[in-house]
Image (tube, rainbow, N blue to C red):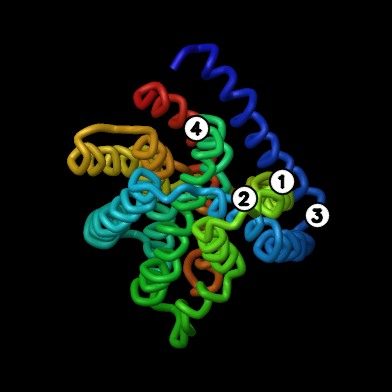
Amino acid sequence: MSAAYYIQLLLEVMLPMALLVAAGGWWRRTLGASGVPMVRGYITTITLNLFAPALLFAAAASAQITTDLLSVPLLLAVGMLISATVLYFLLFHTRLGHNLSAPARAGLLLCGVFGNVLFMGYPLLHFLFGNEGARYAAFADMGAATPLLWSAGVWIAVHLGGQVERPGNALKSWLMLPPVWAFLLGLLVGQSGLELKPLISAARLIGQPTVPVMLLMLGLSIPWSRLRPTSAVLGVVAYKLILMPMLVGGVAVLWLGKLGEAQIAAIIEAGVPTMLMALSVADRYKLDVEIVALAVAWSTVLFLFTLPIGLMILL
């Protein structure tokens, strides 16, 4: 990757992302403790019910289903499941997590496995690979991150966190998400052979605010005044940003013998920061929300340093 290309990436992708997160942090200060949950609720509602469904519908409806495209969620899912096993051992059976409560260890386990593959991955992969890169991010989210969060992730929260007696039906919660149905509808439209380009273009336009709004909410959700990390937080963040993409890259080479564009996209997605939804899951299943917020914050900040190094190696 040339210096000019990196500067372009910095100015067109990383700088706007950083400014949106920073704007959310400034907004958090002006809102006060009582105003943050209300604004987060408004943003979540409109994003989950309008912006994100439109974005995912457009990506799915315009996709050509190929083995390369499907390899992205498959590689990411394999990496996530292996990482869950490794981090379980590290957090529950080594000194890394020996001073932490069960809700804290379960929360950090979620943080080390589930990345912000849509809201961070979408603009990054779109810059690197164009419209196909945006599809990689959509399929990584709907084909790996989101279903695994509401299955394996909820299992981790309930059985390893141990704070909820009646967790409810996680599968039903996942199937009730509008983005899931929008993505599935997009797949049906895309494979139907119908000429619906105006509809897809309209959906893409409606979905454009998804990433900026969610990055703004990321800044709004980070506890900026309490950012002192623990060794466990930094250890999990290091695994998420460095070791997990290396793991996915190793799986890709062993499986395919080479790294193409799709496999590089999967590696990049494996190294994105912790997903914001981890905070919602931690709150819902009574995990340690503060330590999860710390992991989200530090993974987001340190991603600005690990990303260029990773891209220099991959590209």
Distance Cα–Cα, label 1 vs label 3: 10 Å
- Element assignment for label 1: helix
- In this view of the protein, which residue sits in the foreground, 206 or 105? 206
Q: In the drawing, does residue 199 fall left or right of residue 283?
A: right
Mark 2 residue type: Ile
What residue would you read off at disc 2?
Answer: 222
Which x, y percent locates residue 25? Answer: 70, 45
Q: Quadrant of residue 26?
A: top right
Q: Nearer the viewer, mark 1 or mark 2?
A: 1
Mark 3 residue type: Leu
What residue would you read off at disc 4?
Answer: 129
What residue would you read off at disc 1?
Answer: 24
Which x, y percent locates residue 291? Answer: 49, 57
Distance Cα–Cα, label 2 vs label 3: 13 Å
Badge number at residue 301: none
Mark 1 residue type: Gly
Which mark sits nearer the N-terminus, 1 or 4? 1
State the residue at coordinates (33%, 53%).
74
Q: Are marks 1 and 4 in contact (CB under 8 Å)?
A: no
Q: Are marks 1 and 2 in contact (CB under 8 Å)?
A: yes
Which mark sits nearer the N-terminus, 4 or 3? 3
Q: In the drawing, does residue 216 fall left or right of residue 182?
A: right
Can residue 217 be spotted in the picture? no
Q: Are marks 2 and 4 in contact (CB under 8 Å)?
A: no
